[in-house]
Amino acid sequence: MPKLLKRVFTSVIISIVIYLGIAFGLTYFGDLKEEAVKPETVNQERAEKQEHVVSRGIDFSEMKLDYADMPPLQSYGTRGEGQLQYRYYSSDSDKVLILLHGSGWHSQQFYPLAKFISEQGLAQVYTPDLRGHGVNPQRRGDIDYIGQFEDDLADLIIGIKQDSPESSIIMGGHSSGGGLAIRFAGGQYGEQADAYLLLAPFIFYNAPTTRPNAGGWATPYTARIIGLSMLNNIGIHSFDNLISIEFNMPQAFRNGTETLAYSFRLNTSFAPRDYEADLSAIYQPLLVLAGTADETMFAEKYQPVIVQSTPDNKQVQVTLIPGISHMGVVVSPDVRPEIKAWIEGL
Protein backbone atom coordinates (compact mmCIF):
# COMPACT_ATOMS: atom_id res chain seq x y z
CA MET A 1 0.00 0.00 0.00
CA PRO A 2 2.74 2.57 0.81
CA LYS A 3 4.34 1.90 -2.59
CA LEU A 4 0.98 2.33 -4.32
CA LEU A 5 0.34 5.60 -2.51
CA LYS A 6 3.82 6.78 -3.40
CA ARG A 7 3.21 6.02 -7.07
CA VAL A 8 -0.13 7.81 -7.00
CA PHE A 9 1.42 10.79 -5.25
CA THR A 10 4.28 10.87 -7.75
CA SER A 11 1.85 10.67 -10.68
CA VAL A 12 -0.19 13.55 -9.26
CA ILE A 13 2.90 15.71 -8.79
CA ILE A 14 4.12 14.96 -12.31
CA SER A 15 0.68 15.81 -13.73
CA ILE A 16 0.61 19.13 -11.85
CA VAL A 17 4.11 20.01 -13.04
CA ILE A 18 3.20 19.18 -16.65
CA TYR A 19 -0.04 21.18 -16.39
CA LEU A 20 1.74 24.20 -14.94
CA GLY A 21 4.54 23.86 -17.48
CA ILE A 22 2.08 23.94 -20.36
CA ALA A 23 0.13 26.82 -18.83
CA PHE A 24 3.20 28.98 -18.19
CA GLY A 25 4.70 28.06 -21.55
CA LEU A 26 1.59 29.20 -23.40
CA THR A 27 1.34 32.32 -21.23
CA TYR A 28 4.87 33.58 -21.83
CA PHE A 29 6.10 31.97 -25.03
CA GLY A 30 3.09 30.78 -27.05
CA ASP A 31 2.50 33.94 -29.07
CA LEU A 32 6.15 35.02 -29.36
CA LYS A 33 5.21 38.67 -29.05
CA GLU A 34 7.95 41.28 -28.88
CA GLU A 35 5.70 43.84 -27.19
CA ALA A 36 5.58 44.46 -23.45
CA VAL A 37 3.35 42.12 -21.49
CA LYS A 38 1.43 44.76 -19.56
CA PRO A 39 -1.38 46.61 -21.34
CA GLU A 40 -0.67 49.99 -19.76
CA THR A 41 2.88 49.81 -21.14
CA VAL A 42 1.70 48.85 -24.63
CA ASN A 43 -0.87 51.64 -24.63
CA GLN A 44 1.80 54.15 -23.61
CA GLU A 45 4.21 52.90 -26.27
CA ARG A 46 1.52 53.17 -28.94
CA ALA A 47 0.84 56.77 -27.93
CA GLU A 48 4.52 57.71 -27.90
CA LYS A 49 5.55 55.99 -31.11
CA GLN A 50 2.44 57.09 -33.04
CA GLU A 51 3.13 54.23 -35.44
CA HIS A 52 1.09 53.72 -38.56
CA VAL A 53 -1.54 51.01 -38.40
CA VAL A 54 -3.23 49.75 -41.52
CA SER A 55 -6.98 50.18 -41.18
CA ARG A 56 -8.64 46.80 -40.78
CA GLY A 57 -12.03 45.85 -39.51
CA ILE A 58 -13.94 48.92 -38.39
CA ASP A 59 -14.55 52.04 -40.46
CA PHE A 60 -14.16 54.94 -38.03
CA SER A 61 -14.82 57.68 -40.57
CA GLU A 62 -18.43 58.00 -39.40
CA MET A 63 -17.14 59.00 -35.98
CA LYS A 64 -15.55 62.22 -37.23
CA LEU A 65 -18.17 64.50 -35.73
CA ASP A 66 -18.38 67.79 -33.85
CA TYR A 67 -18.21 66.93 -30.15
CA ALA A 68 -17.96 70.53 -28.91
CA ASP A 69 -21.32 70.44 -27.10
CA MET A 70 -20.84 67.03 -25.53
CA PRO A 71 -21.70 67.01 -21.80
CA PRO A 72 -18.71 67.21 -19.46
CA LEU A 73 -17.42 64.21 -17.59
CA GLN A 74 -18.73 63.66 -14.07
CA SER A 75 -17.51 61.23 -11.42
CA TYR A 76 -19.10 58.55 -9.27
CA GLY A 77 -17.73 56.49 -6.42
CA THR A 78 -17.28 52.73 -6.50
CA ARG A 79 -16.33 50.00 -4.07
CA GLY A 80 -13.05 49.77 -6.00
CA GLU A 81 -10.10 52.13 -5.87
CA GLY A 82 -10.68 55.63 -7.23
CA GLN A 83 -13.65 57.21 -8.93
CA LEU A 84 -14.96 56.53 -12.43
CA GLN A 85 -16.32 58.97 -14.97
CA TYR A 86 -19.48 59.24 -17.04
CA ARG A 87 -21.42 61.68 -19.18
CA TYR A 88 -25.03 62.51 -18.38
CA TYR A 89 -27.78 63.52 -20.81
CA SER A 90 -30.78 64.87 -18.91
CA SER A 91 -34.44 64.23 -19.65
CA ASP A 92 -37.81 64.46 -17.90
CA SER A 93 -38.35 60.76 -18.54
CA ASP A 94 -38.42 58.31 -15.64
CA LYS A 95 -36.50 55.85 -17.82
CA VAL A 96 -32.71 55.70 -17.52
CA LEU A 97 -30.55 54.26 -20.30
CA ILE A 98 -26.98 53.22 -19.49
CA LEU A 99 -24.91 52.85 -22.67
CA LEU A 100 -21.67 50.85 -22.51
CA HIS A 101 -19.01 51.67 -25.08
CA GLY A 102 -17.18 49.12 -27.19
CA SER A 103 -13.56 48.01 -27.08
CA GLY A 104 -10.83 50.56 -27.56
CA TRP A 105 -12.81 53.74 -27.07
CA HIS A 106 -15.00 55.44 -24.45
CA SER A 107 -18.26 57.29 -23.79
CA GLN A 108 -17.71 59.87 -26.54
CA GLN A 109 -18.92 57.39 -29.15
CA PHE A 110 -22.51 57.72 -27.95
CA TYR A 111 -22.80 61.51 -28.18
CA PRO A 112 -25.19 61.74 -31.19
CA LEU A 113 -27.40 58.86 -30.06
CA ALA A 114 -27.54 59.88 -26.40
CA LYS A 115 -28.30 63.48 -27.38
CA PHE A 116 -31.19 62.31 -29.58
CA ILE A 117 -32.66 60.05 -26.90
CA SER A 118 -32.53 62.72 -24.20
CA GLU A 119 -33.84 65.54 -26.42
CA GLN A 120 -36.74 63.35 -27.54
CA GLY A 121 -37.68 62.81 -23.90
CA LEU A 122 -37.24 59.06 -24.27
CA ALA A 123 -34.82 58.52 -21.37
CA GLN A 124 -32.11 60.02 -19.25
CA VAL A 125 -28.82 58.68 -20.60
CA TYR A 126 -25.64 57.78 -18.74
CA THR A 127 -22.56 56.91 -20.79
CA PRO A 128 -19.80 55.70 -18.44
CA ASP A 129 -16.12 55.41 -19.27
CA LEU A 130 -15.52 51.85 -18.18
CA ARG A 131 -12.64 51.24 -15.79
CA GLY A 132 -9.32 51.20 -17.65
CA HIS A 133 -10.68 53.47 -20.42
CA GLY A 134 -11.27 57.14 -21.10
CA VAL A 135 -9.32 60.36 -20.93
CA ASN A 136 -7.08 59.57 -17.96
CA PRO A 137 -7.76 56.16 -16.37
CA GLN A 138 -5.80 54.92 -13.39
CA ARG A 139 -4.36 52.02 -15.43
CA ARG A 140 -5.26 52.09 -19.08
CA GLY A 141 -6.28 48.68 -20.37
CA ASP A 142 -6.43 46.99 -16.97
CA ILE A 143 -8.77 46.44 -14.02
CA ASP A 144 -8.30 44.86 -10.61
CA TYR A 145 -10.12 41.54 -11.01
CA ILE A 146 -12.38 39.60 -13.33
CA GLY A 147 -15.94 40.82 -12.93
CA GLN A 148 -15.08 44.32 -11.71
CA PHE A 149 -17.03 45.96 -14.55
CA GLU A 150 -20.23 44.44 -13.17
CA ASP A 151 -19.51 45.73 -9.68
CA ASP A 152 -18.79 49.19 -11.11
CA LEU A 153 -22.09 49.20 -13.00
CA ALA A 154 -23.99 48.08 -9.91
CA ASP A 155 -22.43 51.01 -8.03
CA LEU A 156 -23.45 53.39 -10.82
CA ILE A 157 -27.03 52.11 -10.58
CA ILE A 158 -26.99 52.69 -6.82
CA GLY A 159 -26.13 56.33 -7.45
CA ILE A 160 -28.79 56.66 -10.15
CA LYS A 161 -31.44 55.18 -7.88
CA GLN A 162 -30.50 57.61 -5.12
CA ASP A 163 -31.23 60.50 -7.49
CA SER A 164 -34.22 58.87 -9.26
CA PRO A 165 -35.60 56.12 -7.01
CA GLU A 166 -38.62 55.44 -9.23
CA SER A 167 -36.66 55.23 -12.47
CA SER A 168 -36.52 52.10 -14.61
CA ILE A 169 -33.09 51.02 -15.84
CA ILE A 170 -32.32 50.06 -19.44
CA MET A 171 -28.88 48.45 -19.77
CA GLY A 172 -27.47 48.97 -23.25
CA GLY A 173 -24.18 48.52 -25.01
CA HIS A 174 -22.44 48.55 -28.36
CA SER A 175 -20.10 45.81 -29.61
CA SER A 176 -18.04 44.65 -26.60
CA GLY A 177 -20.25 46.89 -24.48
CA GLY A 178 -23.16 44.76 -25.67
CA GLY A 179 -21.23 41.69 -24.58
CA LEU A 180 -20.75 43.27 -21.17
CA ALA A 181 -24.50 43.97 -20.98
CA ILE A 182 -25.14 40.27 -21.69
CA ARG A 183 -22.63 39.30 -19.00
CA PHE A 184 -24.34 41.71 -16.58
CA ALA A 185 -27.70 40.10 -17.35
CA GLY A 186 -26.39 36.65 -16.51
CA GLY A 187 -24.67 37.70 -13.30
CA GLN A 188 -25.75 38.59 -9.80
CA TYR A 189 -26.99 42.07 -10.79
CA GLY A 190 -29.00 41.13 -13.88
CA GLU A 191 -32.37 41.84 -12.27
CA GLN A 192 -31.37 45.45 -11.61
CA ALA A 193 -32.10 46.19 -15.28
CA ASP A 194 -35.68 46.48 -16.51
CA ALA A 195 -34.76 46.09 -20.19
CA TYR A 196 -31.73 45.47 -22.43
CA LEU A 197 -30.63 47.24 -25.63
CA LEU A 198 -27.81 45.61 -27.61
CA LEU A 199 -26.23 47.36 -30.60
CA ALA A 200 -24.20 44.97 -32.79
CA PRO A 201 -23.14 43.12 -29.66
CA PHE A 202 -19.97 41.07 -29.40
CA ILE A 203 -21.53 37.87 -28.10
CA PHE A 204 -18.35 35.78 -27.89
CA TYR A 205 -15.22 35.19 -29.96
CA ASN A 206 -16.51 31.84 -31.25
CA ALA A 207 -20.19 32.76 -31.49
CA PRO A 208 -21.73 32.36 -34.98
CA THR A 209 -22.22 36.14 -35.09
CA THR A 210 -18.52 37.04 -34.80
CA ARG A 211 -16.23 37.28 -37.83
CA PRO A 212 -12.70 35.89 -37.33
CA ASN A 213 -10.77 38.36 -35.16
CA ALA A 214 -13.78 40.68 -35.42
CA GLY A 215 -13.03 41.29 -39.09
CA GLY A 216 -9.42 42.29 -38.37
CA TRP A 217 -10.20 44.76 -35.58
CA ALA A 218 -8.80 42.52 -32.84
CA THR A 219 -5.46 40.73 -32.53
CA PRO A 220 -5.82 38.24 -29.67
CA TYR A 221 -2.88 36.55 -27.95
CA THR A 222 -4.57 33.19 -28.30
CA ALA A 223 -1.91 31.00 -26.69
CA ARG A 224 -1.58 33.33 -23.72
CA ILE A 225 -5.35 33.41 -23.26
CA ILE A 226 -5.38 29.60 -23.17
CA GLY A 227 -2.47 29.51 -20.71
CA LEU A 228 -4.01 32.09 -18.39
CA SER A 229 -7.37 30.31 -18.58
CA MET A 230 -5.61 27.12 -17.48
CA LEU A 231 -4.06 28.94 -14.53
CA ASN A 232 -7.42 30.51 -13.65
CA ASN A 233 -8.99 27.05 -13.64
CA ILE A 234 -6.80 26.09 -10.69
CA GLY A 235 -7.22 29.39 -8.89
CA ILE A 236 -4.05 31.19 -10.00
CA HIS A 237 -4.82 34.83 -10.89
CA SER A 238 -1.43 36.41 -10.29
CA PHE A 239 -0.77 36.82 -14.01
CA ASP A 240 -4.19 38.15 -15.09
CA ASN A 241 -2.63 41.58 -15.66
CA LEU A 242 -0.76 40.35 -18.73
CA ILE A 243 -1.85 41.68 -22.10
CA SER A 244 -4.15 39.33 -24.01
CA ILE A 245 -5.46 41.36 -26.96
CA GLU A 246 -4.68 44.43 -29.08
CA PHE A 247 -6.84 46.52 -31.39
CA ASN A 248 -6.14 47.93 -34.83
CA MET A 249 -7.35 51.51 -34.59
CA PRO A 250 -6.13 53.62 -37.53
CA GLN A 251 -3.69 56.36 -36.59
CA ALA A 252 -5.90 59.06 -38.09
CA PHE A 253 -8.57 58.43 -35.47
CA ARG A 254 -6.35 58.33 -32.39
CA ASN A 255 -6.10 61.23 -29.95
CA GLY A 256 -4.52 59.62 -26.90
CA THR A 257 -7.81 58.65 -25.23
CA GLU A 258 -8.05 55.31 -27.04
CA THR A 259 -7.17 52.01 -25.33
CA LEU A 260 -5.38 49.68 -27.73
CA ALA A 261 -4.42 46.77 -25.47
CA TYR A 262 -6.26 44.86 -22.74
CA SER A 263 -5.14 42.70 -19.88
CA PHE A 264 -6.54 39.20 -19.56
CA ARG A 265 -8.79 40.17 -16.67
CA LEU A 266 -10.21 43.21 -18.45
CA ASN A 267 -10.77 41.35 -21.70
CA THR A 268 -12.44 38.46 -19.86
CA SER A 269 -14.71 40.87 -17.98
CA PHE A 270 -15.90 42.46 -21.23
CA ALA A 271 -17.49 39.24 -22.56
CA PRO A 272 -20.21 36.86 -21.38
CA ARG A 273 -19.11 33.90 -19.28
CA ASP A 274 -21.30 31.50 -21.28
CA TYR A 275 -23.19 33.52 -23.85
CA GLU A 276 -26.08 31.10 -24.19
CA ALA A 277 -26.57 30.91 -20.42
CA ASP A 278 -26.18 34.67 -19.94
CA LEU A 279 -28.60 35.43 -22.78
CA SER A 280 -31.11 32.91 -21.44
CA ALA A 281 -31.11 34.84 -18.15
CA ILE A 282 -32.70 37.84 -19.89
CA TYR A 283 -36.42 37.74 -19.18
CA GLN A 284 -36.80 41.51 -19.61
CA PRO A 285 -37.63 43.25 -22.91
CA LEU A 286 -34.65 42.91 -25.26
CA LEU A 287 -33.88 44.79 -28.47
CA VAL A 288 -30.93 43.77 -30.65
CA LEU A 289 -30.00 46.10 -33.51
CA ALA A 290 -27.30 45.59 -36.14
CA GLY A 291 -26.49 46.77 -39.64
CA THR A 292 -26.30 44.53 -42.69
CA ALA A 293 -22.95 46.14 -43.62
CA ASP A 294 -21.29 45.35 -40.29
CA GLU A 295 -17.57 44.73 -40.84
CA THR A 296 -16.97 42.78 -37.63
CA MET A 297 -20.13 40.69 -37.20
CA PHE A 298 -22.26 38.35 -39.30
CA ALA A 299 -25.39 40.41 -38.75
CA GLU A 300 -27.73 37.90 -40.35
CA LYS A 301 -26.85 35.37 -37.64
CA TYR A 302 -28.06 37.49 -34.72
CA GLN A 303 -31.68 36.38 -35.13
CA PRO A 304 -31.12 32.61 -34.74
CA VAL A 305 -28.50 32.99 -31.99
CA ILE A 306 -30.59 35.38 -29.90
CA VAL A 307 -33.88 33.57 -30.38
CA GLN A 308 -32.40 30.13 -29.67
CA SER A 309 -30.73 31.44 -26.52
CA THR A 310 -33.89 33.15 -25.18
CA PRO A 311 -36.63 30.60 -25.96
CA ASP A 312 -38.86 31.61 -23.05
CA ASN A 313 -38.66 35.36 -23.55
CA LYS A 314 -41.54 36.64 -25.67
CA GLN A 315 -40.24 40.22 -25.49
CA VAL A 316 -37.23 39.75 -27.77
CA GLN A 317 -36.83 41.81 -30.94
CA VAL A 318 -33.94 41.51 -33.42
CA THR A 319 -33.82 44.13 -36.19
CA LEU A 320 -31.29 44.56 -39.01
CA ILE A 321 -30.86 47.98 -40.60
CA PRO A 322 -29.94 47.82 -44.32
CA GLY A 323 -26.55 49.25 -45.28
CA ILE A 324 -25.49 50.21 -41.75
CA SER A 325 -21.92 49.53 -40.58
CA HIS A 326 -20.58 48.52 -37.16
CA MET A 327 -20.13 52.12 -36.02
CA GLY A 328 -23.10 53.30 -38.04
CA VAL A 329 -25.45 51.42 -35.72
CA VAL A 330 -24.42 53.98 -33.08
CA VAL A 331 -24.34 57.23 -35.07
CA SER A 332 -26.64 56.78 -38.07
CA PRO A 333 -30.02 58.58 -37.95
CA ASP A 334 -31.54 55.49 -39.63
CA VAL A 335 -31.24 53.57 -36.37
CA ARG A 336 -32.96 56.13 -34.16
CA PRO A 337 -36.60 55.46 -35.14
CA GLU A 338 -36.20 51.80 -34.14
CA ILE A 339 -34.78 52.75 -30.75
CA LYS A 340 -37.39 55.46 -30.21
CA ALA A 341 -40.30 53.12 -30.94
CA TRP A 342 -38.90 50.43 -28.69
CA ILE A 343 -38.28 52.72 -25.71
CA GLU A 344 -41.71 54.30 -26.08
CA GLY A 345 -43.23 50.84 -26.04
CA LEU A 346 -41.59 49.74 -22.80
Image (cartoon, rainbow, N blue to C red):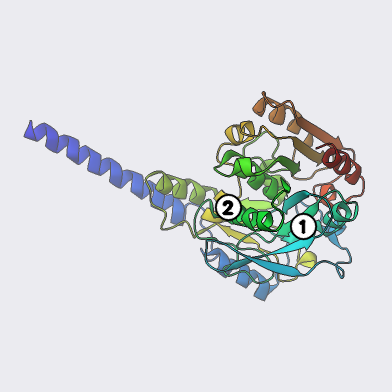
Q: Which residue has dot 1 on it?
A: 55
Q: Identify the amino acid type marked 1.
A: Ser
Q: Nearer the viewer, residue 58 or 223?
A: 58
Q: Nearer the viewer, residue 245 or 155?
A: 155
On residue 335, the disc is: none
Q: Identify the amino acid type marked 2.
A: Asn
Question: Which of pointers 2 and 1 lies earlier in the amino acid sequence?
Answer: 1
Q: Is residue 194 above or below residue 139?
A: above
Q: Residues within 10 Å of mark 1 (few under 14, many from 20)?
A: some
Left/right placement of residue 98 relative to residue 234 reads right
Spot occupied by residue 30 in the image (x, y as percentages of width and height) = 48, 51
Spot occupied by residue 26 in the image (x, y as percentages of width and height) = 45, 50
Residue at 46 percent of width and 46 percent of height: 229
Q: Residues within 10 Å of mark 2 (few under 14, many from 20)?
A: many
On residue 267, the disc is: 2
Q: Secondary structure at mark 2?
A: helix
